[in-house]
Image (tube, helix red, strand yellow):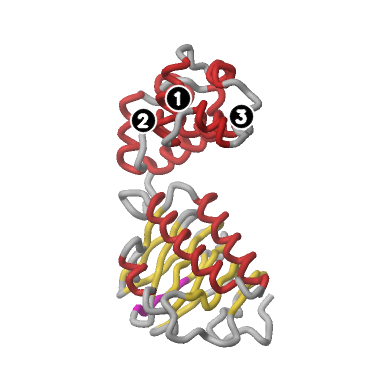
């Protein structure tokens, strides 16, 4: 719930929250996180601001809502990310039937404006990301360190802020916010690959499991992702391979066979393309 000691710009229309803010604002620094949090919006949650003291990025982890910039309203759903700065009027409203759970981070400093230009997202824009879980994990780490209030918290949270913005840029969908049947199909297929990667070994198997034509599945990924369905599958399988190889306890040939690579050389080439190092060298580094 809201605390009487919270700053005035923290919303009171919340059911629950984890938040922190600095009592003394940093001055003259390159980049500093002022506050951050995870808010469970109450059904009547509405924010109407003409200005704001800092630059901010918000991420929807659950539920639905909308944000308005410059007279244009954007729908918000799981994976939506938006930003604003002191010169960006904005209106944020939750869906009463599905109140949002959203994360936010407010920041300042001489590099703050440049970071919202590159990597972004730019103030007054909304992007949709393909990896909500990864972005949520960075937000949670930022919150954990900010709430810890150690002598290193300010430096750690500023580094995590850059990590967060890069992760958002890396996973942003090319088409931005979408709410179409095609996007719903893409997300369903993508989640199926994530949940069943051990059982899948080809584009044909993926498409068959999703009840789609392989060419159409690839078109969906070209539109909404930065990788093909098979590249996503391969990345998940090789991530598992790296975990198996860590420490040098499992031979490379055994891991290749476990993942269905009939040719160990094919496995080694694929592993090196993704990890930048051969599986045998990776295994030795972690002995």
Q: Which of the 4 quarters of the picture holds residue 112?
A: bottom left
Start-end of magenta stretch: 88-92
Q: Residue 152's mark? A: none
Tag 3 or tag 2, which sits nearer the N-term?
2
- Few, some or many residues within 10 Å of mark 2 (<14, 14–19, 20+): many
- Pointer 1 residue: 206
* SS assignment at label 3: helix
* 164 shown above or below 24: above
Q: Is residue 52 on the magenta stretch?
A: no
User: Disc 2 vs disc 3: which is toward the camera?
Assistant: 3
Residue situated in front as seen by the camera: 184 or 2: 2
Q: Which of the 4 quarters of the picture holds residue 67?
A: bottom left
Could you tell me if the residues under marks 2 and 1 are in contact, i.e. CB atoms within 8 Å?
yes
- Pointer 3 residue: 244
* 103 shown above or below 184: below
* SS assignment at label 2: helix
Q: How many marks?
A: 3
Identified at 54% across, 64% down, the residue is 102
- Few, some or many residues within 10 Å of mark 3 (<14, 14–19, 20+): some
* 187 shown above or below 200: below
Identified at 54% across, 57% down, the residue is 138
Please identify the dominant SS of the magenta region. strand
Residue located farthest toward the top when viewing the structure as drawn: 262
* SS assignment at label 1: helix
CA gap, disc 2 to disc 1?
A: 9 Å
> Would residue 103 be seen by someone viewing this image from the given angle?
yes
């Amino acid at each position: 719930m809201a605390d009487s000691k919270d700053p005035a710009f923290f919303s009171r229309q919340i059911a629950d929250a984890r938040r922190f803010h600095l009592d003394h604002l940093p001055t003259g620094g390159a980049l500093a996180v002022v506050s951050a949090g995870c808010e469970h919006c109450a059904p009547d949650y509405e924010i109407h601001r003409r200005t704001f003291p800092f630059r901010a990025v918000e991420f929807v982890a659950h539920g639905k809502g909308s944000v308005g910039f410059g007279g244009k309203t954007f729908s918000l759903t799981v994976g939506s990310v938006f930003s604003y700065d002191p010169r960006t009027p904005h209106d944020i409203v939750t869906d009463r039937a599905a109140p949002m759970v959203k994360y936010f981070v407010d920041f300042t400093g001489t590099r703050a404006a440049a970071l919202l230009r590159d990597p972004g997202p730019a103030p007054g824009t909304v992007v949709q990301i393909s990896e909500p879980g990864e972005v949520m994990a960075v937000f949670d780490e930022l919150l954990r360190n900010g709430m810890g209030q150690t002598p290193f918290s300010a430096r750690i949270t500023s580094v995590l802020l850059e990590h967060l913005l890069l992760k958002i840029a890396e996973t942003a969908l090319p088409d931005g916010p979408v709410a179409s049947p095609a996007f719903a199909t893409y997300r369903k297929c993508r989640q199926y690959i994530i949940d069943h990667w051990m059982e899948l070994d080809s584009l044909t198997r993926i498409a068959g499991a999703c009840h789609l034509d392989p060419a159409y599945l690839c078109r969906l990924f070209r539109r909404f992702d930065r990788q093909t369905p098979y590249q996503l599958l391969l990345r998940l399988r090789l991530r598992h391979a790296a975990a198996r190889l860590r420490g040098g306890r499992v031979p490379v040939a055994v891991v290749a066979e476990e993942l269905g690579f009939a040719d160990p050389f094919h496995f080694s080439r694929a592993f090196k393309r993704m990890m930048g190092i051969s599986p045998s060298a990776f295994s030795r580094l972690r002995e």
